[in-house]
Image (cartoon, rainbow, N blue to C red):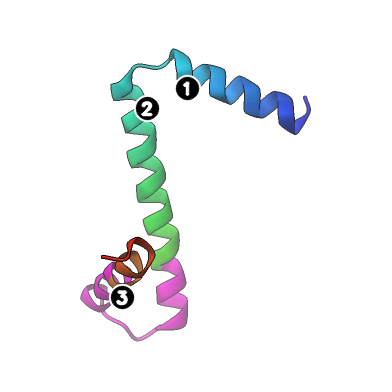
Amino acid sequence: MSPEQAVRLQVLRYQQMTGEQRLGVALRLHELACSLAREGIRHQHPTASADEVEDLLHRRLRMVTGA
């Protein structure tokens, strides 16, 4: 399967999902992205506490969203 075919199949499957199912996918992807960002923060700041990691994550998210 080519990458283009895979994307078309993925879009078709998303179109077949309910709104609730698509929201669930989006929320899981968001949590995955946050987990990866936390790991990057821990790598950059190995002595940071869990609270400090969360604070740095929130700062990054605000930078991305412009909030």
Picture residue at 51% right of the left edge, 18% below the top: 13
Camera-nearest residue between 39 and 9 = 9
- How far across and how far down the image is residue 17, in percent? 40, 17
The amino acid pointed to by label 1 is: Tyr
Disc 2 residue type?
A: Arg
- Position of the N terminus, as image quadrant, is top right
Query: Magenta: predominant secondary structure element?
Result: helix
Earlier residue among tags 2 and 3:
2
Q: Position of residue 53 (x, y in %)?
A: 30, 74
Marks 3 and 2: in contact by CB < 8 Å? no
Label 1, label 2: how far apart the Cα atoms are: 7 Å
Judging by the rendered image, the residue that carries numbered circle 1 is: 14
**Where, by quadrant of the figure, is residue 67 drawn?**
bottom left
Residue at numbered disc 2: 22
Horizontal arrangement in the rendering, residue 12 relative to residue 67 (left or right):
right
Query: What SS does tag 2 mark?
Result: helix
Q: Which residue is mark 3?
A: 56
Does 24 sit left or right of 16 as displayed? left
Where is residue 52? Give x, y as percent: 25, 78
Q: Does residue 44 sit above or below 7 in this rendering?
A: below
Residue contact between numbered discs 1 and 2, judged by CB atoms under 8 Å: yes
Q: Give yes or no for residue 30 being in the magenta stretch.
A: no
Q: Residue furthest left?
A: 51
Classify residue 62 by image quadrant: bottom left
Residue under the point 45% across and 60% down: 36
Q: Which mark is residue 60?
A: none
Query: Of all residues shown, which one is farthest toward the front?
Result: 66
Q: Between disc 3 and disc 1, whose residue precedes?
A: 1
Element marked by disc 3: helix
